[in-house]
Every structure is written in structure tokens, then in C-alpha cells.
Image (tube, helix red, strand yellow):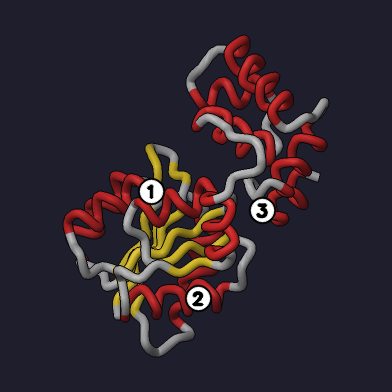
Amino acid sequence: MSVMLVDDHELIRQGLRRAFERDAGFTVVGEAATVAEAQKLAEATQPTVAVIDIRLPDGSGLELAQRLRETRGDIGLVILTMYAGDDHLFGALDAGASAFVPKSSPSDDVVAAARHAAATPSAFVADGLAEAMQRRLHPTGPQLTRREREVLDLLADGLGVSSIARKLYISESTTKTHVSKLYDKLNASNRAQAIMAAVRAGLLSRHEEAQSG
């Protein structure tokens, strides 16, 4: 089985490559750091499985996964992400992914997910999927807009207002408004309280909470 690795961090790609090279069932056919590179690589190598980071410098890994799925129904798609909240999990499901794996997971879990993806590319697996489905069917926590979820992710990543504004290509005043609304919805008065509330509501993973602290 051939696998393509898509992540903008070279160290992560190297770690994944070593994990897959230890498994006799896989051959790494290439690496990409951007959506554009990944699309060209996928066309050239036609991999059995693509392991894709959810956030790439020139676009979304979920959008890349969706394009690959539309092109090839038989490709295995593993979404690898630092952001393991429900929104990203369902985003991966909607994009046609085969598996959703947090970056905090051992590399062997990624290989196992790739093996599943190769065997049954249309069957989605993710830790906590049942619980996430329950939260979606019976929402009890705060309901955030897509932009508020993006701001929350970046707050959990340790970014300040100026950095978030640059990342999302919006003004600082607009960013402050989003942060303020986010705090109101999470009943928080600062970043730490907001992140803790988001974890309890299933909007962020424990891994992200630890990183922000």
C-alpha cells in the first residue's frame, strides 16, 4: 500500500515517514507541505492512502480531502489534526475522510488508521465519534459560528488578537468582537476560562487545553 504524507511541519512528516517505513505493508510515495503540492503529488503517484493535516498554509486539509474523494472513491483519507473538537471531526466526516486522528495520538495509531482507510475507505472511524454524535443530536453547550470556532482554535493555539487577525485576514477590531462574543457564549472572562469551557462542551480536546496552558 502506498501512502502520501501532507503536513507543513517537516518534523511531523519525518516522524510519520519513519512510522510507515517500519510497517512492511506500506510504502511512502511522497510528501507535501501545501494543498497545491499535495494535489500534484496525488495525481502523479495515485496513493492508496493520503494522511492530511487539517490546516495547511494555502488552504484547508478538509477541502483537499474532499477534492481527492471526488476524484477517487477508493482512496483512503486520514485526517491528522491538532484540533480534535466536534466541529473538525464532523468536518472530516462530511469531507469523505476514512479516519480522524488527533496529532497527540501515537504514530502507530496513524498507521492503524491508514490500514483501515486502505481496506474500507468509505467507512469513517474516530475516537469519541459516538459521544460527538450524541452532542450533535442533543446539543446542550454553546453554539458557535464557524468564525468563532476558528478564533477559538487559534486562541487554543496560543495566538493573540493581532496574530489571529493576520491569520484570518480580518481587522483587529473585528477579531476583538469575535473574541468578546466567544467569551460571552462560553461564560468566560479570559482565554483560560474560555478554553476550559470549550473542552467541557466538546469544542476542543484535552490536548489543546494542555498546549494552551
Find the residue positioned furthest to the bottom.
24
Which mark is drawn over residue 70?
none
Residue at point 71% right, 37% down?
Answer: 158
Residue at point 46% right, 71% down?
Answer: 17
Say which of 165 and 32 sits in front: 165
Residue at point 33% right, 45% down?
Answer: 63
Give neighbour class at mark 3: few <14, some 14-19, many 20+ (Cα, 10 Å).
Answer: many
Instruction: Please tell me how many numbered marks the rendered image carries.
Output: 3
Measuring from the top left, give residue 211's x and y in whole percent.
Answer: 74, 49
Measuring from the top left, give residue 44's x and y in whole percent.
Answer: 18, 61
Q: Is residue 169 above or below residue 173?
A: below
The amino acid type found where label 3 is placed reads Ser
The amino acid type found where label 1 is placed reads Leu
> Which mark's residue is nearer the viewer, 3 or 2?
3
Q: Is residue 126 above or below residue 62?
A: below
Q: In the figure, is residue 47 to the left or right of 209? A: left
Residue under label 2, please give it: 18
Is residue 83 visible in the rendered structure shown here?
A: no
Find the residue positioned furthest to the top.
173
- Whole-number angstrom distance, CA of label 3 to CA of label 2: 26 Å
Q: Quadrant of the C terminus?
A: top right
Residue at point 37% right, 87% down?
Answer: 25
Residue under label 1, please give it: 62
